[in-house]
Amino acid sequence: MKFWKYGRVAVALIGAIVLGLSITCCGVYTSGYMYVTGAQYNQIGAFKIDHDFGYLTPVTGSPFPAIGNDPVQEVVIPGGRFLATVNKGSGDVSMYTIGGAGTLYYQASYPTSGSNPVSIGLSASGGFMFVADQNAPPDVINGVDVNAGRGDITVFQVNSSTGKLTLITNANTFNTSGSQLPYFAVNYKPVQVIEAGGAGAAYLYVLDQAYNIVPGGAAANPDVPAACFSSPAMQTACGTPDVFLYQINASTGQLTLTQNSALSVPNVPGGALSTIYHSNAYVYLLNTATNAQFPTGSILPYTIGPGGVLQTLVGGTAANTPTAASNPDAVLTNSTGQFLYVANFGPNPNPNLPSSNISPFTIDPTTGQLTQINTGQGNYTSGSGPIWMALDSTGQYLYTANFSDNTISAKVIDATHGQLSNLIKGTEQTKTVGQPTYVVVSGRTF
């Protein structure tokens, strides 16, 4: 919809038409559009979000076919005109134009430099896109593949007018033939990439989950790269989770190392860290590993120090709520950064409690420490297997994408106390695409 070419009169006219379509006689109107990637049938579900009550209505034509196999994450480009999905199975990023009334139109696909891309993030301006590949391309030096078992970041420049992506090559690293590498290396099994700022600079944080390696070598660990068993030191590296740090050049998209090594996360086994999330001054990691001190998992809070280095928050690790289901795998703060919510995939270790649920916390405005919100009812319910969360564009509603029962759950956020309640109109659970993997919201309504 390239209506911006036709002048102010046309813009006003089209805006009036869309407004007429979006607002009914009763004053109900759409506050934005929600997009949900589904892995089971390679689809994207699209919904209108009701501003006054938060309920969802499918966009005409939804679900849309995902052009790419196994879409696992997605982002809306700032401005709300384009949606990008990262497709693990086909190893690429698909770009879609968001048209009138939230309709999706496929535009093009762009291969990533490595394989098995699993996460996608944007620079603050939206001008650069960062995609985490779990397997970097081979880089053989003196007969040794220095990338064996490692992942990478593919960087694209985003054209905000057309949605076209352009690969950014690594100006600091060259292959043996003298060409710039088309990626930036990270460590073992990256699962999430985020951008965060600190002291006037922008940084890229990559959660390298590493592998949960059991005794017995390669035969006992079929999902672990064979290179991880080439030496005891390599096996240790492959099983040690960390957060890999790059500084982002806001003008060129180039990534530069600021430290000699990644931030290791002590006392956490490989495969246990599920996600990394940034809000205001803090970065959070979710740890699914349990013990006597943290029977339902834990939250690792950090502040951003000089050079982007993550510094453990005073008070250290916070316990997940005692009635939480197991496997905390998504975290979200409200729009003001006062409250934090953790989605627990499940199952619940207590068979008398819901299999999946949401843990609520307040964030101390001075210290950043987390305190469980007294709900009077334990944790909040969700659909089965909540895998990601999103806010609507007004910050009134919280939504979870539920992998196991193919639904979207909706809650109203109490802006004063952070408590969650059911919608007062419409259904709390909305059916969506099969095996939803991610959910994002665009606040653009025309």
Image: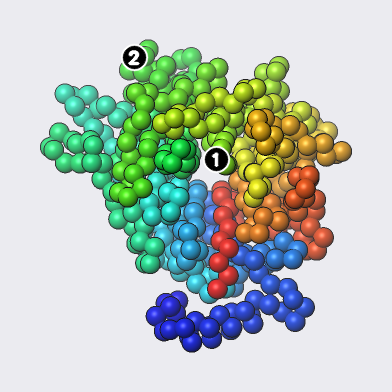
Quadrant of residue 302 in the image?
A: top right
- Amino acid carrying mark 2 in the image: Ser
Label 1 crowd bin: few (<14), some (14–19), many (20+), radius 10 Å: many
Does 427 appear above or below 239? below
80 or 116: nearer the eye? Answer: 80
| Residue at horizontal 56 percent and vertical 38 percent from the top | 281
202 or 329: nearer the eye? Answer: 202
Comes first in the chain, label 1 or label 2: 2
Left or right: residue 374 compared with residue 319: right
Q: Residue furthest left?
A: 177
In the rendering, at what x and y percent does residue 58 appear? Answer: 64, 67
Q: Which residue is mark 2?
A: 231
| Residue at horizontal 62 percent and vertical 79 percent from the top | 19
Does 357 appear above or below 42? above
Q: Which residue is mark 1?
A: 278
Label 2 crowd bin: few (<14), some (14–19), many (20+), radius 10 Å: few
Kindly identify which numbered label has been placed on residue 23. none
